[in-house]
Image (cartoon, rainbow, N blue to C red):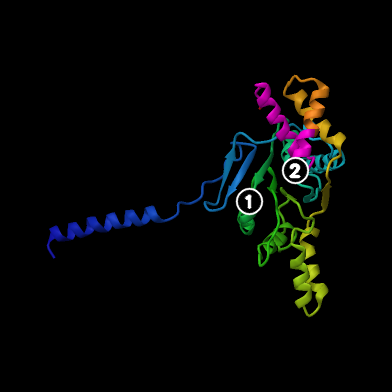
Amino acid sequence: MTDKTRDALSEKLDLLIEAVGRLAPRPPREPDFGAADCFVWAAERGELEPVFHVNRVDLGLIRGVDRVRDILLDNTRRFAAGLPANNVLLWGARGMGKSSLVKAVHATVNDGPAGALKLIEIHREDIDTLPRVLALLKGAGCRFILFCDDLSFDHDDTSYKSLKAALEGGVEGRPPNVIFYATSNRRHLLPREMIDNERATAINPSDSVEEKVSLSDRFGLWLGFHKCSQDDYLGMIEGYVDYHGLEIDPSQLRAEALEWATTRGSRSGRVAWQFTQDLAGRLGRPLRD
C-alpha cells in the first residue's frame, strides 16, 4: 500500500468518524434553574426547557373554588418553606380552573425575594420517564412542583406503575425537594371499565381493584372541583371584566354572559374566559398580559 493510498484511507476514516459522531445523540445540557421559574420536561432530549412567558391568570381571578384554593395554597406554602406537604390530585368538572389554579398558586408563593420554588410540567405521555426527571432534581438547591395536566390512563397502559413508584414507592422514595401535582377529570385516574375487567378476570377480584385504586392513594390531598352556579359564573366574568378594564353596562353584561353560557350548554371558568375574550374583541380592547 502506497503512502498516497494510506493517506486517502486515513482521510476517509476521519470523515466517517466525524459523520458517526454527528449521528450520536448529544449529551443533555445541565439544567440552569436560575434561568426561569417554570420549565417543561423534554423527554426525548432529557432536558428541562425554560418557559419565560407562562400562560396563567392572577389567583384572585379564579372564583368559585375558594376552599380548594386555600388548601392548595397552604400546602404549597408549607412545601416551599421546607415543611411536610402532600402530593395533590385536583380532579373533577372540566373547565373549572384546575390547571390554572396550580400555576396561579405557584406564582403567588414564588412572588418573593428568594423565588426558589420551580414549576416543572411533564406531559402525560412522558410519565414513564419520571425516574430520569427525579434524578436531575434531587441534587438541586431548589424546591420543585412537578406538574402533570390532564393525567389519566387508558386500557393496557402500564406507565401508571412508574408514577406509583416515583410518588411513594421504591427504596429512595420521592426526593424531599420535589412534590407532585396532577389534574384529572377522573378521581381514580383509570377507566371504570378497566377496573371492572380486571376484577372479572382476577383470581381474587379485590386484589385488582386495590392495585388500580392505590395509584390515587399516593396523593395525600384530593381536591374536588364541581360545576359552578350561575352566581359564581357571573362573578368570574365580572372579575375578568374589571381586571381587564372592559367597559359595558352591567345589565347588558349579565344578559350576554347568560346567553353565552346557554349556547355553550355549560357554565365554567373556561366558558367565562372565552366569553371575556369575545367581549374584548367586540369592544376593540386588548387584554392585559
The kind of residue tagged 2 is Gly
Verify whether residue 279 appears in magenta.
yes
Q: Are marks 2 and 1 in contact (CB under 8 Å)?
A: no
Image coords of residue 197 (percent x, y): 75, 72
Disc sitting over residue 95 in the figure? 2
Q: Main secondary structure of the magenta part?
A: helix
Q: Nearer the viewer, mark 2 or mark 1?
A: 2
Tell me the magenta residue range: 259-286
Image quarter of residue 162: bottom right
Work out whether mark 2 precedes mark 1 in sequence or the reverse, and give the earlier one.
2
71 or 260, nearer to the observer: 260
Residue under label 1, please give it: 123
Placement of 247 over or under 100, stated as above or below: above
Residue nearest the viewer, comparing 130 with 173: 130
Q: Is residue 105 visible?
A: no
Instruction: Label 1, secondary structure: give it.
Output: loop
Q: Quadrant of the C terminus?
A: top right
Residue 55 is at least partly visible in this image: yes
What is the spatial separation of the Cα atoms under label 2 and label 1, in whole angstroms? 19 Å
Q: Name the residue at the bottom extreme.
A: 203
Where's residue 287, x and y in %? 67, 25
Q: Residue at x 62, y 42 (%)?
A: 39
Q: Which mark is residue 102?
A: none
Residue depicted at 80% across the width and 73% down the height? 207
Disc 2 on helix, strand or loop?
A: loop
- Tell me where residue 67 appears, x and y as whole percent: 87, 41
Q: Is residue 177 magenta?
A: no
